Image: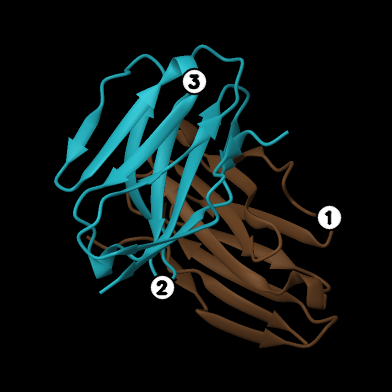
Amino acid sequence: DAGVIQSPRHEVTEMGQEVTLRCKPISGHNSLFWYRQTMMRGLELLIYFNNNVPIDDSGMPEDRFSAKMPNASFSTLKIQPSEPRDSAVYFCASSLGGIYYEQYFGPGTRLTVT
Amino acid sequence: AQKVTQAQTEISVVEKEDVTLDCVYETRDTTYYLFWYKQPPSGELVFLIRRNSFDEQNEISGRYSWNFQKSTSSFNFTITASQVVDSAVYFCALSESGNQFYFGTGTSLTVIP
């Protein structure tokens, strides 16, 4: 079975540009999570969805970040405009039922903003 | 205050040694869940175990074992007879009511051949 799929795997962009990260969760999972990992801040939960509805977005750093889940098999995380401090690895994960269940992670997107 | 504390930032052991990774958590909830994840050098996070707050039985899976003690708010992870392939960063995590989820800062384990 396919795991969580993320694209692109690497993204290099210039400051001020819009960046869109994509995620396809495991089929049948009804929860989806977006994380950011940096050396300074570790793993941070940005937002998570249950049944395509955002449940908790308190981790979203600021208004430049937005996430959508238009259907059960697709989600996007958008940064606009991007800044160098957004450089990080962004992970998407999915689970069967919210934060109480084990999460399965995608390979991550390494974002570099110059 | 940290909700999940992994005080050991880095650990190095020689192959075949046993090693214990510590995890201390903080919560006021009676229902909560604890997790361990592994992040090998390839970067992808891998789920290892999930434990709910009502189940304090220790768990063993091959060379891996977990010791959950509510009295000390700890959920420690032991690798027996470590191998080079165990080299990774290991994260402990807590989920509690109110849709709260927290990762610890991770322990980087290096197994020296």
The residue lying at 83 percent from left, 75 percent from top is A83
Q: Which residue is mark 1?
A: A62
Residue A21 placed where, x, y %? 60, 70
**Mark 3 vs mark 1: in front:** 3
**How far is disc 1 from disc 2 in space, using C-alphas?**
30 Å
**The quarter of the displayed image where residue A34 is located:** bottom right
Say yes or no: labels 2 and 3 on the same chain. Answer: yes
Q: Nearer the viewer, residue B22 or B92?
A: B22
Q: Nearer the viewer, mark 1 or mark 2?
A: 2
The residue positioned 47% from the left and 35% from the top of the image is: A98
Q: Quadrant of the C terminus of chain A?
A: bottom right
Q: Is residue B88 above or below residue B27?
A: below
User: Label 3 belongs to which residue?
Assistant: B72
Chain with colour brown in the figure: A
* Disc 3 from disc 1: Cα separation: 37 Å
| Residue contact at pointers 3 and 1, CB within 8 angstroms | no
Residue marked by disc 2:
B41
> Which quadrant does the N terminus of chain A fall into?
bottom left
Q: Say if labels 3 and 1 share a chain.
A: no
Return the residue found at the far left.
B62
**Where does residue A43 sit, x and y in percent of width and height?**
60, 55
Camera-nearest residue between B101 and B99: B101
Q: Which chain is cyan?
A: B
Specify the subunit that label 3 lies on: B
Task: Please name whichever residue, B10 or A65, is drawn nearer the observer in this view of the structure.
Answer: B10
Q: Is residue A107 left or right of residue A57?
A: left
Q: Amino acid at mark 2?
A: Pro
